[in-house]
Amino acid sequence: MSNIYKELKRRILLLDGAMGTMLQAYKFTEADFRGERFKEYPTPLQGNNDLLSITQPEAIKTIHGKYFEAGADIIETNTFSGTTIAMADYQMEDLVYELNYQSAKIAKEVATEFTAKEPHKPTVCSRFNWANK
């Protein structure tokens, strides 16, 4: 994290943009949100973008990568609604830890990949304050 502080003294760091907006471009269906694991889940799941970290992780990785490619220094995890209160809408309160964990794992993986490509430019995943470099 110390390299990030050095960078902050040198320049303004750029944060990623709206994950939800990027996800809309995929036009995911109810079946896409459910994936195989939640195929028989008793409530509708379409719109639960946090769930996509489990059912569509490649899409989440791709979006994080696009933000780094566009010049972002910091990406946020895909956990806009990663709370028991928000997940109650989908009867998924028990999945909050897993959703947050998987979202952080994906963001960390992508940040690590981009730091390896450009070691002179450290990257950060927010929410869990995991930093590369």
Image: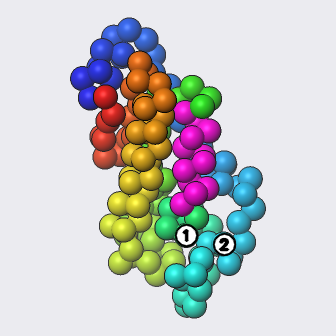
Mark 2: secondary structure = helix
Q: CA distance from mark 1 to mark 2?
A: 7 Å
- Ranked by sequence position, the earlier of labels 1 and 2 is 2
Residue marked by disc 1: 55
Q: Is residue 63 magenta?
A: yes
Label 2 sits on residue: 32
Q: Quadrant of residue 7?
A: top left
Question: Do callouts 1 and 2 mark residues in contact (Cβ within 8 Å)?
Answer: yes
Identify residue type, mark 2.
Answer: Asp
Q: Which residue lies at the image location 32% right of the left edge and 36% below the top edge?
A: 131
Residue located at (42% from left, 47% from top): 109
- Could you tell me the amino acid type at mark 1? Thr
Query: Residue shown at 49%/67% (left/top)?
Result: 54
* Relative to 110, 35 lies left or right: right
Magenta region, residue range: 57-68
Residue 103 magenta-drawn? no
Specify whether residue 43 is in view: no
